[in-house]
């Protein structure tokens, strides 16, 4: 849903953090306001646990600050968008002075909205805040706005393809967590069955200790990395975004059989190029994939919030954790392969899925619609009396749909 706002004489001055890749997805790519990418103090460079806050240079001329993940301490008027935790703790104790300072900032009247990038993220954040005295106040400020993406302009590159030979593409820096191992096993199993399936894998091959869901058992990932040499795999250790999107557009499916994702940007980038997604029924993926309509969801055991059910993080170095992870890879590979096999030669079904994938991107994730919605939110926040508590208007402070199913009824 996008809002229609009358043109005002003077654009707002909005500061966003000159931050990571994510900020571009959670702020306007096009705006009638002046969006300023501001440098900030990266305290996480000193201590990783300090990733959840920052300060901006003083004396900036701005109407409001829109920060993503990092809480800008001392901002006079702000919106904080986030992935799945607010504040980001990284091991900080409840009674730490820093955690208390971050809580004061987002509980203050100066913080006008808390914007989760998914309903999964909102559920996860509220679960972490359960029992705290600030819970009701912070919940009352929360809305959900999905990330946005520029729509591809090349049309459906696979139009007229008969689907007799399928191509699927996996994109993900975190090779294990995002589903790279699953994608390798899909290719190997397809070869064993003689199926006409080719898998592209684009990954910087980050894995193991540095990735919070991965097993740390030595050489766990070696067989999957060795599998990248399979005859039906094309491996890229990295591609510029434009080339990656071109590759997605020339694929029948995008693969995101992830074990844990706060969103999964490659999925909406794929749909922006007409490419349906095969992903896990976990985390935020059910918010973008309607199984059988614009892609397919394969099952993964999840808890009530949508997170993968697995042994505890502290057991990552145990054989039991490694075996659970390995078995889950095999199960998901079988499920993904079954979906792909069922679509071989189904030209009409593939065309329908592709049209629906593009429609999903246009209706739910387009930069144009998102820009109008962010602009409207900025205008409301800038006009609010900072001395008054936040009162959400359901018609204007709407949340993104929890599923794309409504598009296909």
Image: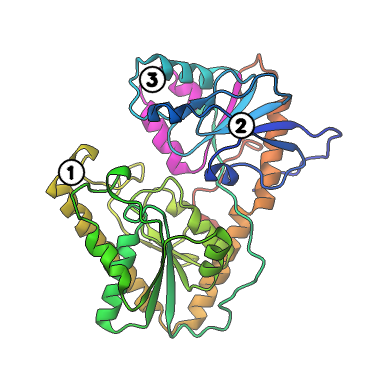
The answer to whether 267 is drawn above or below residue 249 in the figure is above
Q: Quadrant of the C terminus?
A: bottom right
- Please tell me which residue lies in front, 186 or 405: 186
Q: Badge 3, how many Cα within 10 Å: few under 14, some, many 20+?
A: few
Q: Residues within 10 Å of mark 1 (few under 14, many from 20)?
A: some
The residue labelled by disc 3 is: 132
- Residue lying furthest front: 46
C-alpha distance separating marks 3 and 1: 32 Å
Residue 135 magenta-highlighted: yes
- The secondary element bearing badge 3 is classed as loop
Picture coordinates of residue 60, whole percent (x, y): 70, 23
Question: Mark 2 sits on what residue?
Answer: 39
- Decide: is 324 above or below 358: above
Which of 126 and 408 lies nearest the eye of the viewer? 126
Q: Which residues are magenta?
A: 110-138
What's the residue at 60%, 53% (across, down)? 149
């Amino acid at each position: 849903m996008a809002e229609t706002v009358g043109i005002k004489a003077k654009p707002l001055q909005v500061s966003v953090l000159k931050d990571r890749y994510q900020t571009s997805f959670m702020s306007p790519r096009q705006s009638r306001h002046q969006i300023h990418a501001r440098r900030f103090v990266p305290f996480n460079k000193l201590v990783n646990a300090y990733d959840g806050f920052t300060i901006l240079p003083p004396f900036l001329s701005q109407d409001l600050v829109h920060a993503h993940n990092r809480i800008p301490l001392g901002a006079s008027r702000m919106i904080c968008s986030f992935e799945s935790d607010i504040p980001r703790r990284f091991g900080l104790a409840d009674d730490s002075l820093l955690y208390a300072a971050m809580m004061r900032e987002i509980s203050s009247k100066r913080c006008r909205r808390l914007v989760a990038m998914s309903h999964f993220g909102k559920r996860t954040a509220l679960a972490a805040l359960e029992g705290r005295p600030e819970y009701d106040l912070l919940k009352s400020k929360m809305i959900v706005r999905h990330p946005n993406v520029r729509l591809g302009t090349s049309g459906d590159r696979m139009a007229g393809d008969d689907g007799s030979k399928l191509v699927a593409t996996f994109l993900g820096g975190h090779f294990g967590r995002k589903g790279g191992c699953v994608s390798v096993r899909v290719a190997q199993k397809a070869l064993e069955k003689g199926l006409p399936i080719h898998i592209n894998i684009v990954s910087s091959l980050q894995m193991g200790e540095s990735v919070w869901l991965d097993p740390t058992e030595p050489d766990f990932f070696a067989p999957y990395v060795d599998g990248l040499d399979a005859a039906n795999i094309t491996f890229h250790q990295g591609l510029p975004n434009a080339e990656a999107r071109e590759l997605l557009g020339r694929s029948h499916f995008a693969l995101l059989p992830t074990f844990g994702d706060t969103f999964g940007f490659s999925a909406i980038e794929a749909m922006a190029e007409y490419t349906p997604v095969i992903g896990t029924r976990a985390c935020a993926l059910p918010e973008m994939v309607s199984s059988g309509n614009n892609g397919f969801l394969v099952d993964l055991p999840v808890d009530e919030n949508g997170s993968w059910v697995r042994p505890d993080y502290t057991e990552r170095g145990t054989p039991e954790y490694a075996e659970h992870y390995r078995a889950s890879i095999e199960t998901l590979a079988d499920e993904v392969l079954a979906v792909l096999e069922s679509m071989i030669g189904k030209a009409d079904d593939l065309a329908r899925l592709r049209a629906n994938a593009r429609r999903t991107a246009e209706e739910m994730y387009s930069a144009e619609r998102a820009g109008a919605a962010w602009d409207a939110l900025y205008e409301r926040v800038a006009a609010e009396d900072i001395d008054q508590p936040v009162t959400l208007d359901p018609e204007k402070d709407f949340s993104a749909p929890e599923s794309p199913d409504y598009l296909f009824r």
